[in-house]
C-alpha cells in the first residue's frame, strides 16, 4: 500500500503519495523515449523538482499550481521529497547525466573574446 500524506495548500487539500518503483521506471522510460511532457515554465520553478513532478506525486493537477507562489507550494514539495527519496535520487542522477552530455556537446568556450573586424 502506498504511503500518503495530506497537505493544505491555500484552501485546497492535497494528498501526496509515495510513487511505486514501476511509476519511477515508467517516468524514466518516457524520458528515454522522448514522450515525457515538458512544461518549460513548470520545469524550472526549482532546480530539483518540477510542477509535473509534484502533480505526479499528488492528486493535484499541474494547472492547479498556477495561482500559487513557489513558497506556497514548499510544504507540498517537502512532503513529496519525504515520501519519494528514491525518485529524487533518480531525478538528480538524470539531471547530472544530462548536464554532462550538454557539456560534451557544446564547444569549448574560449577565454578570448571574439575579435571585432
Image (spheres, rainbow, N blue to C red):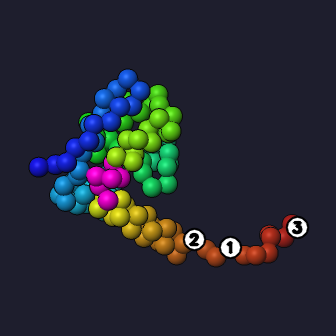
Q: Local crowd at mark 2 within 10 Å, few (<14), some, or many (≥20)? A: few
Residue depicted at 41% across the width and 27% down the height:
10
Camera-nearest label, 2 or 3:
2
Image quadrant of residue 107?
Answer: bottom right
- Mark 3: which secondary structure? loop
Q: Which residue is mark 3?
A: 117
Q: CA distance from mark 3 to mark 1?
A: 20 Å
Q: Position of residue 112 (x, y in %)?
A: 79, 75
Q: Which residue is mark 2?
A: 106
Residue 107 belongs to the span the image colors magenta: no
Q: Position of residue 85 (x, y in %)?
A: 32, 59
Numbered range of the magenta stretch: 80-85
Image quadrant of residue 110?
Answer: bottom right
Q: Position of residue 88 (x, y in %)?
A: 36, 59
Q: Position of residue 2 (x, y in %)?
A: 16, 49
Q: Earlier in the sequence, mark 2 or mark 3?
A: 2
Q: Is label 2 in contact with label 1 (beta carbons under 8 Å)?
A: yes
Q: Earlier in the sequence, mark 3 or mark 1?
A: 1
Image quadrant in which the C terminus is located: bottom right
- Looking at the rendered structure, the number of numbered marks drawn on it comes to 3
State the residue in front, 74 or 58: 74
Q: Which residue is mark 1?
A: 109
Amino acid at each position: 500500500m502506498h504511503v500518503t500524506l495530506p497537505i493544505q495548500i491555500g484552501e485546497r487539500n492535497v494528498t501526496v503519495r509515495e510513487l511505486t518503483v514501476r511509476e519511477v521506471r515508467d517516468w524514466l522510460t518516457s524520458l528515454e523515449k522522448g514522450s515525457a511532457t515538458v512544461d518549460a515554465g513548470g520545469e524550472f520553478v526549482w532546480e530539483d523538482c518540477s510542477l509535473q513532478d509534484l502533480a505526479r506525486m499528488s492528486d493535484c493537477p499541474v494547472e492547479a499550481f498556477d495561482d500559487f507562489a513557489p513558497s506556497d507550494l514548499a510544504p507540498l514539495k517537502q512532503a513529496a521529497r519525504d515520501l519519494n527519496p528514491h525518485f529524487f535520487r533518480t531525478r538528480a542522477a538524470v539531471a547530472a547525466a544530462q548536464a554532462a552530455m550538454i557539456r560534451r556537446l557544446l564547444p569549448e568556450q574560449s577565454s578570448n573574446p571574439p575579435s571585432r573586424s
